[in-house]
Image: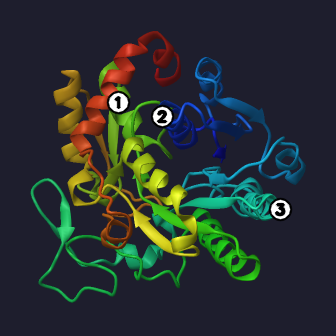
């Protein structure tokens, strides 16, 4: 099997490429990336050592994809402008051209090559207003679904499933990914493309060059490691907002299964996240960071909520678990300790990025 991974030098793409190489040394692995993201270029030396091919190109340019030589069986589309805040403070051109235009170019490339496609979408396709209006209760260290109130379709105490509302405003980022999902399904119907859509939650783990607007959970560990202060932002500034975290190891375990039989589930949409066992509030995550690093840092409070922020999201993995006999194995604690081990092993390199 020959595999191309777009966004292949980014955190998610490079993580998948390395795991494919480790498990399948005989397969051809090609990573494709424009190296725009901070830290992406730092993966290239590692790629050379592991015999992972790298092609410098941009998904916005169909010609760059067409220039890839050889036959391919699978395209994993991990390319994206990944911030939920993207485009809010300026032109949305790069966001739209990358996330939607890039998807269209990937679809055409896969169609012409007769390759299967795994499209990595996002949980942010769900309506922002519906996410913000969830019936929640405030517990000691986190927000939780209030099961005593009437819950909207697609929400339970387990989390959010694929039937949750997508009909309303969701952020520019979420709109580009939802539109991309529609085009993936249309290509499946019109051209017989074999493709699966994964609505991923927050993906976090070692090797991510996190920043405030994207990759914040890696940044959170790094700030503790280097003794730099942070802020609880939004929803009263208490740090009780909740997300579930998916480790790259668990994402690879799912992608690996899907890649073997994409036709069986072609056009299907699956939520894929850390679930309840991988969920954490920022307060709880701070406690884990303190445990891993032995550091307590100054923590400020910013009560005001940014336009794209949400108070709670935990993935209900029931559908994907039933289809692929898959469930995430890594907890939020595992993720924190894996990130800390990576920071410690690469102290001088990561210090230049995080400080």
Mark closest to the chain's N terminus, 2 or 1? 2
What kind of element bears circle 2? loop
CA neighbours of label 1 inside 10 A, class few (<14), some (14 to 19), many (20+): many
Q: Is residue 238 visible?
A: no
Image coordinates of residue 291 in percent, x first then y, are: 16, 29
Q: Is residue 108 left or right of residue 35?
A: right
- Judge from the rendering whether residue 61 lies leftward or rightward of residue 201; answer left or right: right
Q: Left or right: where does residue 210 sit relative to residue 278?
A: right
Residue 208: mark: 2
Residue that label 3 marks: 112
- How far apart are the two marked residues, 3 and 1, measured between alpha carbons? 39 Å
Whole-percent x and y of residue 187?
72, 75
SS for callout 3: helix
- Judging by the rendered image, the residue that carries numbered circle 1 is 339
The CA span between labels 2 and 3 is 33 Å
Q: Are marks 3 and 1 in contact (CB under 8 Å)?
A: no
Report x, y in % for residue 23: 47, 35
Q: How many marks?
A: 3
Residue at 40%, 79% in the rendered image: 130
């Amino acid at each position: 099997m020959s595999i191309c991974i777009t966004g292949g030098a980014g955190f998610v793409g490079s993580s998948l490429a390395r795991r494919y190489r480790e498990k399948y040394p005989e397969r051809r692995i090609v990573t494709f990336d424009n190296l725009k993201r901070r830290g992406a270029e730092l993966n290239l030396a590692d790629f050379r050592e592991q015999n992972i091919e790298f092609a410098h190109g941009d998904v916005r340019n169909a010609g760059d994809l067409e220039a890839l030589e050889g036959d391919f069986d699978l395209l994993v589309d991990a390319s994206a402008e990944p911030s939920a805040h993207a485009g809010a403070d300026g032109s949305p051109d790069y966001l739209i051209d990358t996330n939607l235009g890039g998807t269209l170019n990937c679809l055409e490339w896969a169609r012409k090559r007769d390759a299967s496609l795994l499209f990595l979408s996002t949980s942010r396709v769900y309506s922002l207003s519906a996410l913000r209006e969830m019936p929640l209760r405030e517990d000691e260290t986190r927000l939780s679904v209030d099961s005593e109130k009437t819950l909207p379709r697609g929400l339970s105490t387990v989390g959010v499933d694929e039937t949750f509302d997508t009909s309303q405003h969701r952020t520019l980022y979420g709109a580009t990914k939802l539109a991309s999902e529609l085009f993936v399904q249309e290509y499946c119907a019109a051209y017989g493309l074999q493709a699966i859509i994964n609505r991923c939650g927050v993906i976090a783990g070692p090797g991510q060059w996190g920043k405030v607007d994207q990759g914040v959970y890696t940044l959170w560990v790094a700030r503790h490691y280097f003794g730099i202060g942070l802020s609880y932002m939004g929803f009263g500034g208490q740090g009780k907002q909740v997300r579930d975290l998916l480790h790259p190891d668990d994402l690879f375990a799912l992608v690996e299964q899907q890649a073997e039989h994409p036709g069986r589930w072609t056009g299907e949409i699956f939520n894929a996240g850390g679930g309840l066992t991988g969920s954490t509030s920022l307060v709880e995550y701070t406690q884990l960071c303190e445990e891993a690093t032995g550091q307590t840092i100054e923590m400020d409070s910013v009560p005001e909520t940014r336009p794209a922020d949400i108070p709670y999201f935990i993935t209900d993995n029931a559908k994907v678990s039933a289809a692929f006999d898959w469930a995430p194995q890594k907890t939020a604690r595992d993720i924190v300790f894996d990130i800390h081990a990576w920071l410690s092993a690469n102290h001088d390199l990561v210090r230049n990025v995080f400080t």
